[in-house]
Image: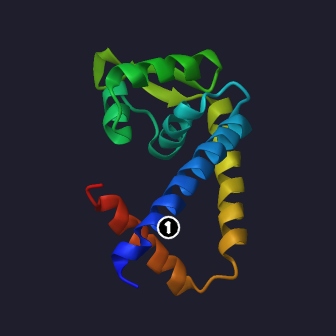
Amino acid sequence: MSAEEYLPALEEEMRAMGRRTRLRTRELARAVHPRLDPTAYPLVVLLSKDGAMRVSAIAAALSLDKSTVSRQVDAVVRIGLAERVPDPSDARARLVVLTEQGRTKVAAQLADQAKRWREALGGWDPDDVAELTRLLHRLGEADL
C-alpha cells in the first residue's frame, strides 16, 4: 500500500487520539483540583516544571494569547493553586507561581501520570518507545 492509501486511517487515528487527549486532560485537571478548567491544566504543569513566570512568558511557552493566559491565571489563582508575586528583577511586574497546595497537587498528579506511562509502556521495547517519540515529534513539526 502507498502512504496515500493510509491517510484516511491515519486521520481517523489522529481524531481519536485528539478525543482521548481532551478526555484525559479533563481527568488530569480534575485530579489536580475539581474546579481546574482543563484548558488551564497545561499552565499549572508548566509552572510546576519552570517555576515562577511572567504572564507573557507563559503565553509564549503555551503558544496562547496573553489575554487568554491572564484569564486562566485569574481562574487558577481563585481556586488557590497559584498566586501572583512581585518580580524581584522589576518591581512593576508580577510573576505567577504555584502555591504550596498547587505544587503538591500537581506533583502528585504528575507522579501518577508517570506511573501510568510506565505501566502502559512497560511491555514495549525501549527502541519502539524511542521510535514512537521520534515519529510523533516529526509529525508535530509537519505543517499540517
Q: Is residue 30 visible?
A: yes
Residue 93, image quadrant: top left
| Residue drawn 65% across the image and 60% down it | 114
Crowding at dot 1, Cα within 10 Å, few <14 / some 14-19 / many 20+, comes out as few
- Quarter the N terminus occupies: bottom left
Q: Nearer the viewer, residue 51 or 89?
A: 51
| Residue drawn 60% across the image and 28% down it | 37
Q: Is residue 65 left or right of residue 28?
A: left
Image: 116 above or below 24: below
Q: Nearer the viewer, residue 88 or 27?
A: 27
What's the residue type where badge 1 is placed? Ala
Q: Is residue 84 visible?
A: no
Image: 20 above or below 101: below
Where is residue 27? Give x, y as percent.
Answer: 70, 42
Image: 14 above or below 99: below
Look at mark 1 in the image and give the residue it sits on: 9
Where is residue 92? Give x, y as percent.
Answer: 29, 13
Residue 136, image quadrant: bottom left
Q: Is residue 116 left or right of residue 4?
A: right
Q: Looking at the image, what colour scheme do you see?
A: rainbow
Where is residue 17? Give x, y as percent.
Answer: 56, 56
Where is residue 19? Give x, y as percent.
Answer: 59, 48
Image: 58 above or below 7: above
- Quarter the C terminus occupies: bottom left
| Residue drawn 52% across the image and 53% down it | 15
